[in-house]
Image (cartoon, rainbow, N blue to C red):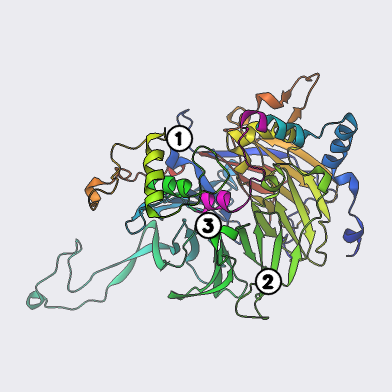
Amino acid sequence: MSQKQDEENPAEETGEEKQDTQEKEGILPERAEEAKLKAKYPSLGQKPGGSDFLMKRLQKGVSIISYLLLLESKGILGMKSIEQKYFDSGDYNMAKAKMKNKQLPSTGPDKNLVTGDHIPTPQDLPQRKSSLVTSKLAG
Amino acid sequence: VAGAGGGGCPAGGNDFQWCFSQVKGAIDEDVAEADIISTVEFNYSGDLLATGDKGGRVVIFQREQENKSRPHSRGEYNVYSTFQSHEPEFDYLKSLEIEEKINKIRWLPQQNAAHFLLSTNDKTIKLWKISERDKRAEGYNLKDEDGRLRDPFRVTALRVPILKPMDLMVEASPRRIFANAHTYHINSISVNSDHETYLSADDLRINLWHLEITDRSFNIVDIKPANMEELTEVITAAEFHPHQCNVLVYSSSKGTVRLCDMRSSALCDRHSKFFEEPEDPSSRSFFSEIISSISDVKFSHSGRYMMTRDYLSVKVWDLNMESRPVETHQVHEYLRSKLCSLYENDCIFDKFECCWNGSDSAIMTGSYNNFFRMFDRNARRDVTLEASRENSKPRASLKPRKVCTGGKRKKDEISVDSLDFNKKILHTAWHPLENIIAVAATNNLYIFQDKIN
């Protein structure tokens, strides 16, 4: 039973071996890839982890408007990694007004999306998925 | 050693000879999002195989009994039952769409003629009962054969209803609905070895349920920081120990696994064991943390080991040793030099699952281009196989595939740049006793069997 414990065979870790070879060549493949990414997106923050990144992950499924507001408050719109601090609510509203004039990233505003002028009713919301069909695996 | 009973594993070495058995699903190029398979799971006997899809539907296949008149259909899986488990919902309070996608299915051990399984989407877990009905009562006194009520005053004689056989009908009914216990998205469910409780885990919390009680759930792990700005990691998977009902593990996005013992305290925020492989600081890059994120954790059937899947490798850990894994198997190391594009197309966030065979001598996990990888732990051999309609002649042997990383490409090899990253095998399952595997390739389910079987 204790055999397995002794068998932490480095030969298993072929990945590390390859890495060593590449290290000898002077470039770690991961570092080369990182350089490529930073060349494309110079404003990318140091660490991909951290609360901003994870918060985005946690809020999968959130509506577009509240997601953009979150990004805004974190100062991420425009790929800024510095958090913006506001003097007061007036300052915040001024900044928000400026932001709305900038181009919004990727998904444009949905025509059906209600932005808060009135209380939404189920009819106003984006079309739900149509009637459910039997799986093709069962067909 | 738990797992293979009798004739499960081939004698001598584990020289698998995988052959195509069946493929389920449509052939058309245009795959509807709803048809994408999101989970695959054999039950405890291996006679039933359940799949869940993005459309919230569950399809259960049953293995055919041996039939002398149709020998070629021995061991084939055919549709047993299908039902709509979850439907799309909208949380009006938070303006959140709740997907109907089935994230996980877990079977309960069979205790009577009916079969029970748990299925979950992002927010709600349901206990389904699947039962057979092959008899019908006839000869009621107060109803006609077509169900119309008889006038009781016209009944002049009494008769005893008799049971008559009928065509087999398989019914699925939701017996329990466990809702409103998760703020974040459920990624795992796991039935406890006590067969009475189960856990459900989301990004930040793990809850303990009793199978009979739907209005109460105990929170046993909570890693939500007081200030969300301090959030550094999330829970990615969780599982109960197969034999010790007080032990559970959960993995994180930082590549660590924590083992908790529910006997030590009601809230298991303090782990009993902490599994983390030391990282070489000189090799750290922007991608290090992302690719170390564990997408799946599975105990071995024996309960002595556990396996973790991160983006590029599968690691086997001895529960008695927290400092490093006892085995590391590279799944697709050639992707390390493609991390930039994989980050851009979001593939780096794909969550691959992994599984053990019944005797814990082999492990399997998926990759891209409809490739999947199998590692024979005893023979120290690994193989890359492909789930493809081109290899779908009955009982055709699967040919090992090879990816070439650079320079000269040999015949039959495929270059890294030709891999189709849209063809991902995220979900695979291994029959608990025999060498039969189920591989989900987008909207198709492939079943392969070992020739020696």
Secondary structure of the residue carrying tag 1 is: loop
Name the kind of residue labelled 1 in the image.
Pro
- x then y, percent, for residue B51: 51, 50
For marks 2 and 1, give the CA distance.
42 Å
Nearer to us of marks 2 and 3 is: 2
Seen in the picture, residue B54 relative to B250 is either above or below; the reply is above
For marks 3 and 1, give the CA distance.
36 Å
Comparing B172 with B406, the one in front is B406
Q: Earlier in the sequence, mark 2 or mark 3?
A: 3
Q: Residues in magenta?
A: A38-58
Tell me if residue B334 is in the magenta stretch: no
User: In the figure, residue B33 lies in which quadrant?
Assistant: top left
Nearer to us of marks 2 and 1 is: 1
Q: In which quarter of the image is the N terminus of chain B?
A: bottom right
Seen in the picture, residue B241 relative to B253 is either above or below; the reply is below
Q: How crowded is mark 2: few (under 14 residues within 10 Å), some or many (20 or more)?
A: many
Residue designated by label 2: B260
Residue designated by label 3: B105
Secondary structure of the residue carrying tag 2 is: strand
Residue designated by label 1: A105
Secondary structure of the residue carrying tag 3 is: strand
User: In the figure, residue B394 lies in which quadrant?
Assistant: top right
- x then y, percent, for residue A85: 50, 52
Seen in the picture, residue B84 relative to B414 is either above or below; the reply is below
